């Protein structure tokens, strides 16, 4: 019945539409064979589908499909703009959505729509949604977060002090080992020494850095005769606090977020990253690169191309509208 109706009535119809009908009817027939019941809107349950019912269903689908098609030359751009602009007048001017436990602000409302449609170069709240390969372990999610979020030496040390005596002039760095373990950062003292030596601002050589213990480092900076030792030491101490030892420079914050789209009882976790370094985040170990999304259209365009940017525009406008209780047909985008 299905094949005969398609060959006679739906032969000039879009192939995707026909495939969807075939998939739906095939799934329905398989469930009926397995004895599964389908509840309907009138609180009745139907198991068997007769040929008359199937014909009526196909005719109804075909009529709705024909009504949805438009004539050539229709001003679809004006209709789409009107369909999006009219509901936008009901939106509040400034709205913020709190995502996650750490209350990460995401700009919504009319300002967000202006950013999307105008393709703003710098948006107010760039957010990257990052799925991970093991999403049911919060400790694993925290370790992946530590690989992405910017961690400086000032975050993991207890003190950076100066030592002046008759025999020695140096800077001592004391690491907070307990804090490093608590935050589950994949950092050791060798990585910190490597970061100090590779800094172009500090300009220290290997013979000027000494590891005293697993939590203590001594620096022996040299000074020129034109500069005093005190000035050189203070300058190095200032730059040591902001020295990047883990993560990416442009990622100021990342939070572990419970995935709201997950319907299972066991919580699933993902990361919300505040920043626009999409290329670096995608290349991070344990990140599912095919599922990473960003709310900045231009960043997506530069990294993933024009088709991904087009889909980002659709997703972001739809997300902004839905947060205000406004439903707009996706075809208007």
Image: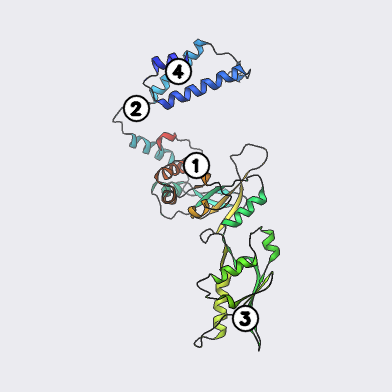
Residue placed most toward the observer, 204 or 99: 204
Q: Give the foreground label among 3 and 2.
A: 3
In this rendering, would 182 be left or right of 191?
right
Marked residue nearer the N-terminal end (3 or 2): 2
**SS class, disc 1:** helix
Marked residue nearer the N-terminal end (4 or 3): 4
Residue 275 position, x and y percent, is 51, 55
Q: Give the foreground label among 4 and 3.
A: 3
Marked residue nearer the N-terminal end (2 or 4): 4
Residue 262 position, x and y percent, is 61, 39
Residue 2 position, x and y percent, is 47, 16
Q: Residue at x 64, y 67 (%)?
A: 189
Q: Residue at x 65, y 64 (%)?
A: 188
Q: Which residue is mark 1?
A: 319
**SS class, disc 2:** loop
Q: With respect to residue 31, does 258 lie above or below?
A: below
Verify CB contact (< 8 Å) between mark 3 and mark 1: no
Q: Which residue is mark 3?
A: 170
Q: Which residue is mark 2?
A: 70
| Disc 3 to disc 2, C-alpha distance | 78 Å
| Disc 3 to disc 1, C-alpha distance | 55 Å
In this rendering, would 326 be left or right of 246?
left
| Disc 4 to disc 3, C-alpha distance | 84 Å
**SS class, disc 3:** strand
Q: Which residue is mark 4?
A: 60
Q: Residue at x 56, y 85 (%)?
A: 229
């Amino acid at each position: 019945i299905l094949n005969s109706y398609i060959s006679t009535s739906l032969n000039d119809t879009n192939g995707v539409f026909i495939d969807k009908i075939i998939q739906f009817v095939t799934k329905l027939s398989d469930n009926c064979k397995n004895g599964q019941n389908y509840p309907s809107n009138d609180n009745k349950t139907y198991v068997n589908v007769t040929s008359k019912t199937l014909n009526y269903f196909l005719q109804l689908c075909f009529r709705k499909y024909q009504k949805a098609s438009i004539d050539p030359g229709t001003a679809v751009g004006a209709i789409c703009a009107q369909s999006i602009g009219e509901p936008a007048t009901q939106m509040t001017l400034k709205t913020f959505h709190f995502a996650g436990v750490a209350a990460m602000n995401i700009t919504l409302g009319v300002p967000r729509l202006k950013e999307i449609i105008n393709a703003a170069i710098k948006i107010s709240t760039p957010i990257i949604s990052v799925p991970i390969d093991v999403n049911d372990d919060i400790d694993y999610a925290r370790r992946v977060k530590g690989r992405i979020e910017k961690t400086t030496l000032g975050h993991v040390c207890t003190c950076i002090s100066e030592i002046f005596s008759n025999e020695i002039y140096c800077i001592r760095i004391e690491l907070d080992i307990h804090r490093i373990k608590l935050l589950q950062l994949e950092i050791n003292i060798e990585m910190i020494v490597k970061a100090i030596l590779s800094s172009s601002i500090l300009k220290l050589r290997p013979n000027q850095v000494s590891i005293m213990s697993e939590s203590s480092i001594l620096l022996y900076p040299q000074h020129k005769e034109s500069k005093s030792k005190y000035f050189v030491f203070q300058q190095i101490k200032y730059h040591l606090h902001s020295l990047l030892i883990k993560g990416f420079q442009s990622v100021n914050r990342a939070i572990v977020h419970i995935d709201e789209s997950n319907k299972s009882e066991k919580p699933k976790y993902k990361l919300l990253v505040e920043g626009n370094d999409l290329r670096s985040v995608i290349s991070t170990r344990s990140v599912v690169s095919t599922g990473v999304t960003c709310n900045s259209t231009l960043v997506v365009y530069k990294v993933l191309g024009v088709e991904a940017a087009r889909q980002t525009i659709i997703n972001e406008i739809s997300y902004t509208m839905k947060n205000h209780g406004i439903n707009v047909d996706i075809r208007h985008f």
